[in-house]
Every structure is written in C-alpha cells, then in structure tokens.
Image (cartoon, grey):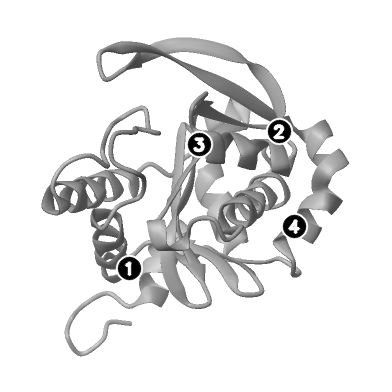
C-alpha cells in the first residue's frame, strides 16, 4: 500500500526487497537497513570525521577530503551497495543504532555467497562514539547475524597493523589470526593483518560474544531475506 504522497511504504519495500526489512536488535544496540533518511544522517556523521587527521584506516580513502566530499562518497557507496543482495554477491551495509541514535555502519560483503558462504566484515563509527565499547558489540552482533541468521561458514576481517582499535576488536570477539598481507596505501607499502572466524570457532566463542553484546539478540525479517538470497 502506498502512502498519500505516492512514496512506497516500508512494508511494501520490504515485500519487494526483503533486505530492507532486516533488523538485528540487542538491548540499546541495533543494526538496520539504511533508507535514504537514515543515510543522510550517516553521511553527515561521517563528514564530521571518523578518525584522526594524518592516518588512514581504510583500504579506499573515502574518509579523506572536505565534509561535502566525504558525505557524497558515503551516499554514492550506499546507493550502489543496496542492489548487491543475492546468491552471487552479498553486500549488507547496516546502520548501527545506539539508544536510537545512528552512530556508524557495520557491513558484510562476499562473492559467490551461495557456494562459499563466506563474508568479510567492515565498519566505521563516528568519532563521538568511539572508545565506548560499541565497536566490539556491533561486530559481535554482526557475527551473530552472519552465523545464526544467514548460515555463514566463515567470516573474515582485515586491518592495517597500525589500526590498533580494529585489531583489538577482532581479537576481542574471537577471530583467529589468518596471516598478513602487503599492500599499497597512499602510494606507499603497507601491511594488514587478516583474521578469520570459522563456524567451529564461532561455536567456541558464541557464549562470550553473547555476554559482550549484553542482551538477547532478536533478528527480524531474516526468513524473507534467506528466500531472496536463494533466489
């Protein structure tokens, strides 16, 4: 059913594109699909900064530039990512809501999903919300979605060796080391660490991650999404 303005309602959108109805909630923390209204808020949040000047924690330096440039990159990335929800390529970029306020983004992405069942996590937090333990909780919540909701076999993560916060989160939630890799950052050689969470490892650390999340996890809209991924 359409509202009086002619815009598609959230119920109709979720019926046609089930990923739009996905919600993962645990106490004061929630991961949810990013609609345009929420995306504008996240773009503004990113434009106000997500890391110190002079450092670059990301493979693609999207967070560097004027506030307008950063905001536009956030918009463009998410508009492109929305369509990539299928059995071949799976990209789920979800807003992180803390006590009802958008504080960042937690995503997963992977190719050949129906065969490999493997995804990589990626995330960012607005600077005002860093150092409060939210980063570890939102990663644990995404791992719960990946393994318990989507049926993932493996979840990986990478971080440059000088990104202490990201490395600490991966270690805290229980990823196992998966080697190092040399790459290029800002036209100079750099090294990042790889981490892997297998389903066997997840079974070992699931209880500890539940305690880290701090509340029972409720996943909404997963059944239609699984049908979409198998389609």
Q: Is residue 128 visible?
A: yes
Element on which disc 3 rests: loop
Disc number lying in front (3 or 4): 4
Front residue of 94/195: it is 195
The CA distance from mark 1 to mark 4 is 26 Å
Crowding at dot 2, Cα within 10 Å, few <14 / some 14-19 / many 20+, comes out as many
Disc number lying in front (3 or 1): 1
Q: Earlier in the sequence, mark 3 or mark 4?
A: 3
Q: Is 6 left or right of 217, judged from the image as shown?
A: left
Q: Earlier in the sequence, mark 2 or mark 1?
A: 1
State the residue position of label 3.
Answer: 87
Q: Quadrant of the N terminus?
A: bottom left
State the residue position of label 2.
Answer: 175
Q: Earlier in the sequence, mark 1 or mark 4?
A: 1
Q: Position of residue 34 (x, y in %)?
A: 37, 61
The CA distance from mark 3 to mark 4 is 31 Å
State the residue position of label 4.
Answer: 212
Element on which disc 4 rests: helix
Disc number lying in front (2 or 3): 2
Residue occupying the point 24% across, 65% down = 40
The CA distance from mark 2 to mark 3 is 25 Å
């Amino acid at each position: 059913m359409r509202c009086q303005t002619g815009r598609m309602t959230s119920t109709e959108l979720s019926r046609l594109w089930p990923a739009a109805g996905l919600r993962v909630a645990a106490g004061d923390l929630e991961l949810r699909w990013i609609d345009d209204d929420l995306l504008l808020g996240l773009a503004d949040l990113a434009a106000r900064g997500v890391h110190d000047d002079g450092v670059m924690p990301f493979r693609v330096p999207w967070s560097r530039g004027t506030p307008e440039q950063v905001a536009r990159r956030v918009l463009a990335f998410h508009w492109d990512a929305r369509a990539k929800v299928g059995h071949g390529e799976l990209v789920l970029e979800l807003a992180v809501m803390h006590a009802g306020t958008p504080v960042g983004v937690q995503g997963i992405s992977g190719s050949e999903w129906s065969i490999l069942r493997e995804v990589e996590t990626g995330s960012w937090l607005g600077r005002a919300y860093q150092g409060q333990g939210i980063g570890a909780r939102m990663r644990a919540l995404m791992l719960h979605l990946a393994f318990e909701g989507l049926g993932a076999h493996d979840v990986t993560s990478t971080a440059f060796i000088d990104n202490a916060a990201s490395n600490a989160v991966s270690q805290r939630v229980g990823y196992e080391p998966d080697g190092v890799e040399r790459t290029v950052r800002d036209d100079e050689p750099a090294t990042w660490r790889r981490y892997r969470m297998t389903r066997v490892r997840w079974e070992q650390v699931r209880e500890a991650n539940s305690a880290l999340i701090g509340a029972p996890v409720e996943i909404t809209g997963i059944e239609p999404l699984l049908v979409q991924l198998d389609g």
